[in-house]
Structures are given as structure tokens and as C-alpha cells.
Amino acid sequence: MDLTTLTLEEMRYIYAAKCDELESLIDGYWSGSVADIENETTLKDQIRALGADIQELERVIAARKSALTNQPNSTN
């Protein structure tokens, strides 16, 4: 996913959706609904991947916000 083409609002929406998905996966993991070791490994991989996606979104959002607040005012 190319985050550079997204607006802050789009990134916030994706961030919220990924957080919800991560929470759901973690709830499923801790509730014991994982049937076998292979599925548990797959679930852990999904959790790690979502965590990495969320961290990347946080990084890009912070950089974008920083760039917006550091723009010089054009008051000619």
C-alpha cells in the first residue's frame, strides 16, 4: 500500500480498521478459539503483520502532521 498517496483522513480510517481487526484477532487468540498449532502460528503471523502495518501508519501520519505544522506561513 502506497501511503504517500493517501490523505490524513484516509490513513486515519485505515488505521482504525486495522486496530479493530487486530483487536478481534487478539480476542480470538486469547479466547482459545484457535483449533490447532498451525492455525495458531498463522494467527500470530497475522497479528504481527497487522502490528507492523499499524506502526507504519503511525509513522507516516506523524511525519505528515509534522510536515504540516512545520510549513512556513506565507504572509506576503
Image: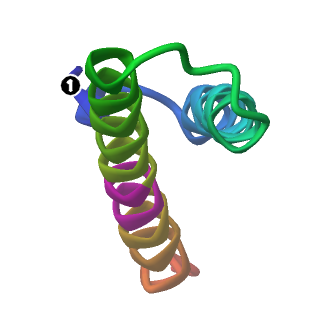
Q: Residue at x 42, y 26 (%)?
A: 6
Residue 35, given in percent of the width and then of the height, sits at 53, 13
Task: Answer with left or right where residue 2 lies relative to residue 42.
Answer: left
Q: Which of the 4 image quadrants contains residue 24?
A: top right
Residue 76, given in percent of the width and then of the height, sits at 51, 79
Q: Which of the 4 image quadrants contains residue 29?
A: top right
Out of 64 and 59, give the one closest to the viewer.
59
| Vertical relation: 59 (above or below) 73 | above
Q: Verify whether residue 19 appears in magenta.
A: no
| Vertical relation: 37 (above or below) 29 | above
Rendered-image quadrant of the N terminus: top left
Callout 1: SS: loop
Residue with the most extreme front position: 36
Q: Residue at x 76, y 38 (%)?
A: 27
Task: Answer with left or right where residue 29 lies relative to residue 6.
Answer: right
Out of 21 and 26, give the one closest to the viewer.
26
Which contiguous range is marked in magenta? 55-60
* Mark 1: few/some/many CA within 10 Å (<14, 14-19, 20+): few
Figure colour scheme: rainbow
Task: Answer with left or right where residue 20 lies relative to residue 25.
Answer: right
Residue 42, given in percent of the width and then of the height, sits at 29, 22
Q: Residue at x 26, y 18 (%)?
A: 38
Q: Which residue is mark 1?
A: 2
- The kind of residue tagged 1 is Asp
